[in-house]
Amino acid sequence: MSGFGGFLLRRAVGTAVTLLAISVLVYVVFYATPGNVAQITCGPRCSPEQVHQVAQQLKLGDPLYLRYWHFLEGIFVGQDYSTGTSVAHCPAPCLGLSYQSDQQVMDIILTKLPVSLSLVLGAMVLWLVIGVGTGVLSAWRRGRFSERVLTAVTLAGWATPVFVLGLVLMIVVCGELQLLPFPQYVNFADDPEQWAWNLLLPWLSLALIEAAAFARLTRAAMLETLAEDHIRTFRAYGVGERAIVGRHALRGALAPVIALNANNVGSAVGGAVLTETLFGLPGIGQELVHAVKVVDLPVVVGMVLVVGFFVVIANAVADVLYAVADRRVVLA
Amino acid sequence: MSEALVASQPPGTDTPVPGASGARQFWRRLRAQRAALVAAAVVALLVLVALAAPLLTALEGQDPTTYHPSLIDSARGGVPIGSFGGISADHWLGVEPQTGRDLFARLAYGARVSLAVALAATVLQVFLGIVIGVASALGNRWVDQLLSRVTDIIVALPLMIMSLALLAIVPSSFPRPVLVSLVIGLIAWGNIAKIVRAQTLTLKGLDYVLAARLSGWGAWRIARRELLPGLAAPVITYAALLVPTNISAEAALSFLGVGVKPPTPSWGQMLTAADVWYQAAPQYLLLPAGALFVTVLALTVLGDGVRTALDPRAASRLRVGTGRRNETGGAGTGKEETS
Amino acid sequence: MSLVEVTDLTVEFGSLRAVDGLSFRLAEGAALALVGESGSGKSTVAGALLGLHRGTGARVGGSVHVAGTDVQQASDGELRRLRGAKAAMVFQDPLSSLDPYYAIGDQIAEVYRVHTRASRRAARARAVEVLERVGIPDARRRSRSRPHEFSGGMRQRALIAMALACEPDLLIADEPTTALDVTVQAQILDLLHTLREETGMGLLLVTHDVGVAAESVDEVLVMRHGKAVEHGPVGTVLGAPAQAYTRELLGAVPRVDAPRAAVAEASDEVVLEATGLRREFGRGRTAFTAVDDISLTVRRGETLGIVGESGSGKTTLGRMLVGLLPPTAGGIRYDGRPHTGVNPAVQMVFQDPVSSLNPRRSVGESIADPLRARGEHDERIRGRVLELLERVGLEAAHYDRYPHEFSGGQRQRVGIARALAADPRVIVCDEPVSALDVTTQAQVVALLGELQRELGLALVFIAHDLAVVRQVSDRIAVMRRGQVVESGPVDEVYDTPREPYTKQLLAAVPALDPELAAQRRAARRELAVA
């Protein structure tokens, strides 16, 4: 297990380096672009004085690396913001101040985060269950008619953009059939039942699309495993088809499914932006789209960093799970 | 299973393997798949419509940007006048609510935008992926470390979020379709670089590449003659699946109102307001949604077909041992970074 | 009643008739070897005994009875009860034949439970018992390991343990030792022998190696193109073969005990000299030394044989000799001058006839490479390539063909022609015949010998097969763990080995004569005890 401990340590260091590199990249892309950074940061309606103040806050007179250091310091230590008359303190994970709404970016994110987490985590459960289930089923029924139906449905799901499915679901279920009211976010703490009912459609539209990718992968990985030599061994020893598919082939598909789930966190976040916008859920995605439209740079940068943070962490966790699922990775 | 048993004999069968080589074999295998052929026909039709959009709209006598206030009922909030959303001999598919712009023209020109943006982004992704992947595989340990790390970071960045953010800070004077393809191309090349790196590493160790080194050729010539042709199959396979992914990405960005902006038409953008009008003008929702669905589906099926034709080993592996004939649905590594 | 009774068996895959009217019987407790080259259909027969072709689309005709089960007529359930319980199979590649994700003990227990309905605990205990039986030390602990944590020989033992779990009447072994080193092969064959003595089970051995058959069975059936060529007691078939093909096959098998046929005239001209070669891979804790301080010389017109088991560093050494791999320490001199990197005067023939030719280029173009790199004119190149093709026994018409249109032996000839195109003084052959059938092997070896005499080439012949190396070499070096443990003139080393490792290697080589094989087995037991 000392090999595994070393692996964990290497992964942790690698994750930290990646996070730092992302912060550099994001800072350079957004704060070292040509053009008046202070003006963009402050927003189009700022007066010259306000712009000047922002320029000072961002230490625009300093060389780039000092400015980045200042920015990093804000994240780890926090910093003070002077808004002309008063001075506000922005505590430790400080991602800056939105000059357009006069709110701290971290506060905005924290109020929106539960919505997005509810959406993505709930959908993840659904897409794993539906996707892997469909994949196993179509590997098990391979060559039969039912497999071809499953394959066709999966392909259709794969090819449908999230927002198209969401639109159609919303119009059919809420508009035409009136089975559900148009979704409105309810806090889990306030009413768990209403929370779930209102999130059902967003969950489905996000999950069904992702599930298609998992169904394809699971099926392909299982079929690949079924073609391997060790399957032949168990057939030659009289082990039944059910045990071969359910025990040996499925185990072979586990590692790729974990890897895909990590890979898909990024894409699911993208899907969440669309779903939130479509269903009017007050999550990070909707806020980001709004911030992009009104060019509220501090909010945009903060959101990119937070989402990047989650995606990198998810990838690291998946890497560790992958190594547990396939211990040979550690030895390599 | 029979193949598996035969294959377990000692290597070096002393019987020549029959079969044609290269491109001819590829076409033969592609033609053998009915679904891929149908998909190819659909894609060809789409490309034709996109290319001939000016011609077709001229035939209709319309263009995608002219407002027709006379064709909408402003008293009822801008609903098109006439049945089925204002379908007439002049407006084959009706007109847009609120503006009265011709739907057919917008759809046809939208195809142009969709395909052009997706193709340009794919070309950029493939170019970056090859350059960085090959450099990483052939460079020394430090170059490889650096480039692999950069690739990891690029893969970790969510395409949707990054493009949204990037689109926010670029001045609006920059031509939007070009910008969207640049953004998608510059962000989503990570996976293809990983594939190219892995394949180059495999090829580099193959005996025939070593033999080429022994014959006295320089590194450049070996890369060009022995390595690049070996990269073609995986790169084409992956690129074929990138095109539909990029189409979805463009549509999603435009749907959110930060991609291609009016007056330039785009399918995703047309859907932005469609839910409000679905009862009065259902085709305003159904046409762009259907166009997107069909395009992405056809390109995906075609991409799967290309994969099967290029990598029959994987395809036949899927058949061996199952005992039953079945076409491969493709060993997807996952839809990349978009939905 | 016989344990196995096969009557008029045919197996067809599409238009290919893999087995064509084969009949044989195997008495209770007897041992039969199916011997043949690749494509002879021998493995297909083994699969047919367990009904493994069912549902694959293969057409099977004739009748197969195994341990009282009519394999052709049996229901799926009956077939499953036969498989593993009454007749068990051991496969060639023990790594890929076990599930990489489960502990070895669990896999054996799973098979045991399928047939006995034993409890989980009892099945696990049975797994440990059979693992002990096949000589896995500390079986209880090792049964929790997964296949990749075992060595090749241990894995094959584990697979045999799985076969033993249900005490079958028949063991079918399909090339059970082909993927193993020669010393490990001897251990596995000895294990099979002992188990058969103890349990009295029948053995059907499928092998391409006549020596392996001679070691293990009472009866031999020689197969070719799906048909039986010759069938009889092992001593008769191998000692006094009645059929021309059997004689040809036996004639092509290299003998480890026959002295080198044609010895090249000694030359003093040293063309290649390596001093203190050393090569390390990896860094830190994962670092290991593949080649450790090796010095050698190769003279004009002679063959230096290098033998070693897998992991001995012989391929790394070969790559350094041709300049494809820079040594960590030490140097190489060609014709007395120090040199680094590749050198047209030193060429290589590779092991794998599939990967050594670019599948996208015609073989003529591949052969022309060294000429083009040298800047020759096009018309001269074509003429020279045609000459070379003919010289290695191919035809001018082959110039524009692609590698996949050639057989393994032909591709190896192309590889030789490509090496010759550079007008080399030394050719390093890295396992040049180990992927070939024995008759093809003999032809390629003969070609290399002819070329050497004609062109005065120096050859470095790297191989794991001791018999082949003896056949071609003037001097040999025996490698183990990156070092040369013994070297000298070939007959001296083979006939009077000094080092224990060399003795062990030579004792492990299967003998063609069954009686000699029995003596060797006894000798190995003594060596193991000593």
Image (cartoon, coloured by chain):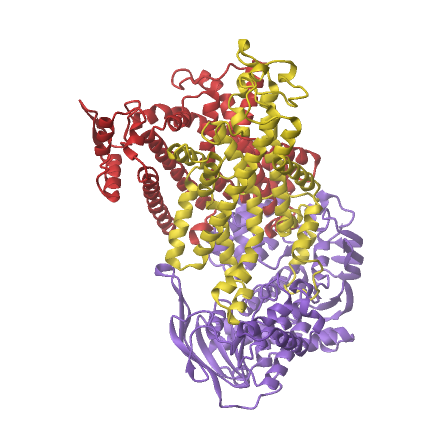
Q: Is residue C269 above or below residue C314?
A: below
Does residue A2 appear left or right of residue C358 in this picture? left
Q: Which tint is chain A?
A: red
Residue C118 seen in the current view:
no
- The x, y position of residue B304, in whole percent, is 62, 43
Chain that appears yellow: B
Task: Give the position of the C terminus of chain A as an image quadrant.
Answer: bottom left
Q: How many marks?
A: 0
Write the residue at 52% across / 43% down. Answer: B122
- The x, y position of residue C216, in whole percent, is 65, 68
Using the image as rendered, state which of residue A318 and residue A54 is in the foreground.
A54
- The x, y position of residue C298, in whole percent, is 49, 83
- The x, y position of residue C520, in whole percent, is 59, 75
Q: Is residue B91 above or below residue B142?
A: above
Outermost top residue: B75
In which image quadrant can residue A53 be found? top left
Using the image as rendered, state which of residue C251 and residue C8 is in the foreground.
C251
Using the image as rendered, state which of residue B7 and residue C265 is in the foreground.
C265
In which image quadrant can residue C30 be found? bottom right
Write the residue at 41% across / 32% down. Answer: B172
Q: Which tint is chain C?
A: purple
Residue C483 seen in the current view:
yes
